[in-house]
Amino acid sequence: MAEYVYINGRERPDFILNNNYLSYGKHFEMHTHRMLEFNVQKEGLGTYRIGTRQYESRPGDIFILSNTEPHQLIPNPGSQIYNLNIHFDPEIFCTSFEKAIDDIPLLAMFFRRTETFSHVLNRDNPDTGVIYRLFHEIEREALEKRPLYHLQIKMLLERICLEILRSYDYCELQPRPRPNANPDFYRISKTMDYIDYNIGKSLTLEKIAQVACMSPSYFSSVFKRYCGIALFEYIAQKRIEYAALLLRTAAKSIADIAYTCGFNNLTSFNKAFLRIHGCQPSVYRKRKNEWEISISDVASIVSPVCSPQNGLR
């Protein structure tokens, strides 16, 4: 189940930690997230599609994903993948309101990539195992919630980003000149926030384009270029993502969940859910135990040391 951490004291979480079980035929479609993401694979074998690239994935792998990269993790036939997803708002690293997000040094692996960049950390680099263990320290903090755990999570995340910058030749350490910086990226990020905060309301192209200060036609083309999918497909995926969370955690009826997530009727909700998750909402809810993991189970999984070459031991 997801753990939400509020680092900057705002109404929305700055950091989300989630454990996922994926099996062949029961995995997510290509999608994007509003936040930046690290994906840590604990068990299973599969293929990770990120934009136009494709990687083999196995235990011990750590993937880096920006908020504009469509991605999909597909388990191999007969294999079940257990992974740790960490999403975080880049603004937690801002030192001033004037600082552009893609100029923040710790975020260079997301915004200032070199030709040698790889979405997966090099398995042969001994620091990969060190970073793997740091992610599990973050997981413990999120689950145990000891005093000031939110500050400890931020410090651990900063250390992870710093270790990546120092140990892998994946990004430029100095910000690029910005005389002709394109503001479209920030406008698209702003509309993603707007969609998240209004996911249960009526969302029209005209209104969302107005938030971005663009014409509807121009906004549609820019959004698809940055996010890899059309606007209303993105909205549908976000609504179904929210609905799946409610199906696993809330005692609401399926009809109530559909309306809460912005669907006008059950028929359209069921069709969208079936298309994205491959099953009806009622079937998904019955399987919720497959998605749940207790703190004691997590402790038994995160305690072993990971070798980059050999995965979990």
Image (cartoon, grey):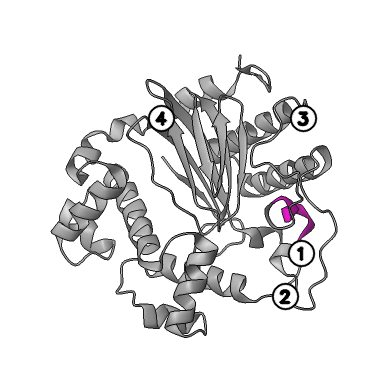
Q: Position of residue 123 (x, y in %)?
A: 69, 27
Residue 278 numbered tag: none
Q: CA distance from mark 1 to mark 3?
A: 25 Å
Q: Amino acid at mark 1?
A: Asp
93 shown above or below 202: above
Residue 293 numbered tag: 4
Q: Are marks 1 and 2 in contact (CB under 8 Å)?
A: no
Reply yes or no: does residue 302 show up in magenta.
no
- Name the secondary structure under disc 2: loop
Q: Amino acid at mark 2?
A: Ala
85 shown above or below 7: above
Q: Quadrant of the N terminus?
A: top left
Residue 181 numbered tag: 2
Q: Earlier in the sequence, mark 1 or mark 3?
A: 1
Mark 2 neighbour density, 10 Å: few (under 14) some (14–19) many (20 or more)? few
Q: CA distance from mark 4 to mark 1?
A: 38 Å
Q: Amino acid at mark 4?
A: Ile
Q: Amino acid at mark 3?
A: Asp
The residue pinned by badge 3 equals 127
Q: Earlier in the sequence, mark 4 or mark 1?
A: 1
Q: Are marks 1 and 3 in contact (CB under 8 Å)?
A: no
